[in-house]
Image (cartoon, grey):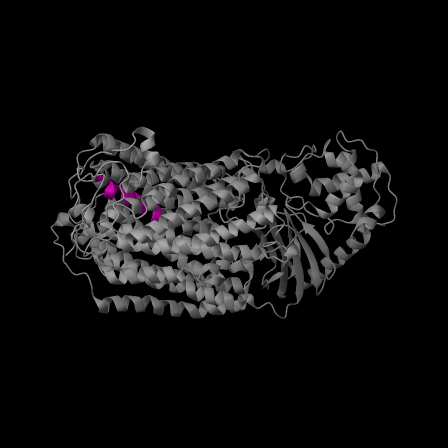
Amino acid sequence: MQQFSARKLGSWALLAGLLALAAVGSAHALEWNLQPAATKIADDIHDLHEYVMLLIVVIFVGVFGVMFYSVFAHRKSQGHKAANFHENTTVEIIWTVIPLLILIVIAWPATRAVIAQKDTANSDLTIKVTGYQWKWGYDYLKGEGEGISFVSQLSTPRDQIENKAAKGEHYLLEVDNELVVPVGKKVRILTTAADVIHAWGIPAFGAKQDAIPGFIRDLHFRAEKTGIYRGQCVELCGKEHGFMPIVVRVVSAADYTAWVGGEKKKIAAAADDPSKVWTLDEIKARGEKVYAANCVACHQANGKGTPPAFPPLDGGKLTTGPKAGHIDIVLNGKAGTAMAPFAKQLSDTDIAAVVTYERNAWSNKSGEVIQPAEIKALRK
Amino acid sequence: MSAVLDDHGHGKDDHHHGDHHHGYGGMMRWITTTNHKDIGTMYLWFSFMMFMVGGVMALVIRAELFSPGLQIVNPDFFNQMTTMHGLIMVFGAIMPAFVGFANWLIPMQIGAPDMAFARMNNWSFWILPFAGSLLIISFFVPGGAPGVGWTMYAPLTVQMGMGMDLTIFAVHLLGMSSIMGSINIVTTILNMRAPGMTLMKMPLFCWTWLITAYLLIASMPVLAGAVTMTLTDRHFGTSFFNAAGGGDPVLYQHIFWFFGHPEVYIIILPAFGVVSQILPAFSRKPLFGYASMVYATSSIAILSFIVWAHHMYTVGMPVTGQLFFMYATTLIAVPTACKIFNWLATMWRGSLTFETPMLFALGFLFLFTMGGFSGLVLSLAAVDIQLHDTYYVVAHFHYVMVAGALFTAFGGIYFWLPKWTGKMYDETLGKWHFWLSMIFFNITFFVQHFSGLAGMPRRIPDYPLMFETWNKISTIGAFGFGISQLLFLYIIVKAISSGEKAAEKQWEGADSLEWTHLPSPAPYHSFETPPVIK
């Protein structure tokens, strides 16, 4: 028996050691509560959460106090004889009414928080967020910066995800183009999606809203501090669901104006002349970049895809067949599959470039050059 | 209902209690049996097998999440694992386990010879292996199993391969099986009670199952409708859930959760029933507030149909919608609290002993209440929006599903095993099983409250570095929990093969008919002449 309990002790010590090792092994501070609030709403949510937690602790002590008292005092081994009562209407009414009263006490702040959270009126800035498999599109619709539009996707290198390189500080929470908003301004976000349901949210803002294909929903936030805030897509949206982060950079009014100015200049500079006639090498180089940004996750860098879900493009039926069918799929997607329509995401030049690239990369050697003008003519 | 449902070829007059089966032998006995005890046994073993399969999937998930980065599986397969783990545990493990209990116990507890529709009973079990096989076969078809989550939200379902169709058919079969089982249970309870066994004299387990059976009959067809619409959207050009054709993806969620919320109570109400048998037995004191338990169970059942959209606070309902569902949801706390208080009052001034079934019942009481607390937090719409689809929700529902339903099922098996097999399990090992499960369960799931509060989304195969510690701890706990269940298998097999002989009334405080009127093991045909209840 002695030996047995020593062994028992040993195995518990081993378990405790393992857990401690797990705690130390990851060099990060333990995050065990809600992220620090950056908006009034998030603050309200924190208060509500703490308030309810307090009530819970009181109930916990009460309920389990009774239970453990009973477990210790009313045991047969201590010679306790069972009483025989089994009903008491007064007591039963009292303990039905008490939880009801507690709920009414909670209901007031809970209702206020819901109403504040849903009040999206009178915003200073309106931005449309579109969920794509697997990136976010941002369009500044109203307010300063109107007309700015970009796509934002994960910038963590694939090597880090596949454990071939050390992971950076903001592993999986970093993007190429951050959403930039001014501090202290009420920002209304309209959410929608192009393919399946996604969900846009930033924990520090206390904001989260599903992005539903074919419908527009909204949420709002007013960030009180400048800084960078990070979130992730929170509705399962397919294979890369874990890899579509959301990053919001909150800047001062002056910085925001400067950023808007810079973006506008970039838009002017990047605008392609839609009637330009490209050479094969020129447009293929452009297409390779578009492919790397939009197609590689499913169809792979080597064009082999991952059949049967994601068909190969290298020697594929579509990429070696007539170009009209190929362009149609890129523009309009394929219903019932993960192939998204790119008509709204990519410019005529980009679509022409990527189709040209796909028809001339790997073992595909059609030699065809698709010009932006052709795409323009085909758009519905 | 006077029919004696024995189709095994022997007149019942020359039939002695304790006799073995008189029909086919070997495998055919199990395929053709219409005996409620045989069918109950098959349900329980089937459910244990599915529990193991679903458990291995959970361990694959936890192994992948041990460290940030992708190590073991690719994201596609990870999604398939989370989907199938959920479906198999809910429909393959937990639900059949309690149907197994119902089959074994309801006839014995109301003094009936068998279930009302014995052949349908056989059929409702034998559908299950086919449904389970369809789910597992879906891994081996082109595109693999669906990676859409057990909730199967549209329109992601439209992108899946034929594994999705197999899953849809499996859900149809499971629904048929549940509905047939429920019709059987309702008919048996309403028509086959022994003389003097009025409804309000029935053991609470029968009451909770009666109410559960009605919930199943009302909600399973709704799920069947939802998945059928998914099927026609996928293949026959309909647009129920496609905005481009005039449909709405959110409609799917409304229909699904109109089934899904009663479903949670379908899982937990029979567990309440089992606990209401175990606690009085080991407190040596009658259940406190029997009548109010019946009323509380009924109110929970009714409320369960008007709270579904609390699973959908982030779809963007109008503010009045949010408020209605928030108030209705918090109301459920009232009857649930009544139940907890009744159980505590049952123990109060009893004469308590702590055999394994009692330990699991107390474990249930403690952990289910914890799950209720996190439920209260989640019921507040504003807080829920913060926590929706994070690990906080994962922690919450594992506290009510695993610690609520699964722990109770373990407790029930230890409690009735002596009656079912006539053999006792090893009490020391049983207690080990309880304490290992209890400790590892909490290691696995308690920390998920923290990662959820900090914002870790569920259903992701890889995560930011700040969540690493909690995930490591959780994975260690999960493997401990999984391995502990092999001990359970060992205990049961050991008890059946070489356990000590159990007494007719193995537990001093047990007072329902199966303990007071039947020997251990309960004879193959019991109560052919109904007992008279005073």
| Closer to us: A4 or A103 | A103
Which quarter of the figure has residue B342?
Answer: bottom left
Highlighted magenta segment, given as a residue range: B405-418
Q: Is residue B361 visible?
A: yes
Q: Is residue B486 visible?
A: no
Query: Which image quadrant: the N terminus of chain A?
Result: top left
Residue B376, position as x, y percentages in the image: 40, 60
Q: In the picture shown, does residue B30 fall above or below A34? A: above
| Closer to us: B494 or B19 | B19
Q: In the picture shown, does residue A293 fall above or below B336? A: above
Residue B447, position as x, y percentages in the image: 42, 47
Name which residue lies at 59% across and 43% down: A240
Q: Label the magenta part by its dominant secondary structure.
A: helix
Q: Is residue B406 magenta?
A: yes
Residue A138, position as x, y percentages in the image: 68, 55
Q: Is residue B262 magenta?
A: no
| Closer to us: B209 or A172 | B209
Horizontal relation, residue B169 to residue B249: left or right: left
Residue B45, position as x, y percentages in the image: 34, 37
Which quarter of the figure has residue B142?
Answer: top right
Q: In the picture shown, does residue A226 fall above or below B34? A: below
Horizontal relation, residue B34 to residue B56: left or right: left
Horizontal relation, residue B256 to residue A378: left or right: left
Total marks shown come to: 0
| Closer to us: B167 or A181 | B167
Which quarter of the figure has residue A280?
Answer: top right
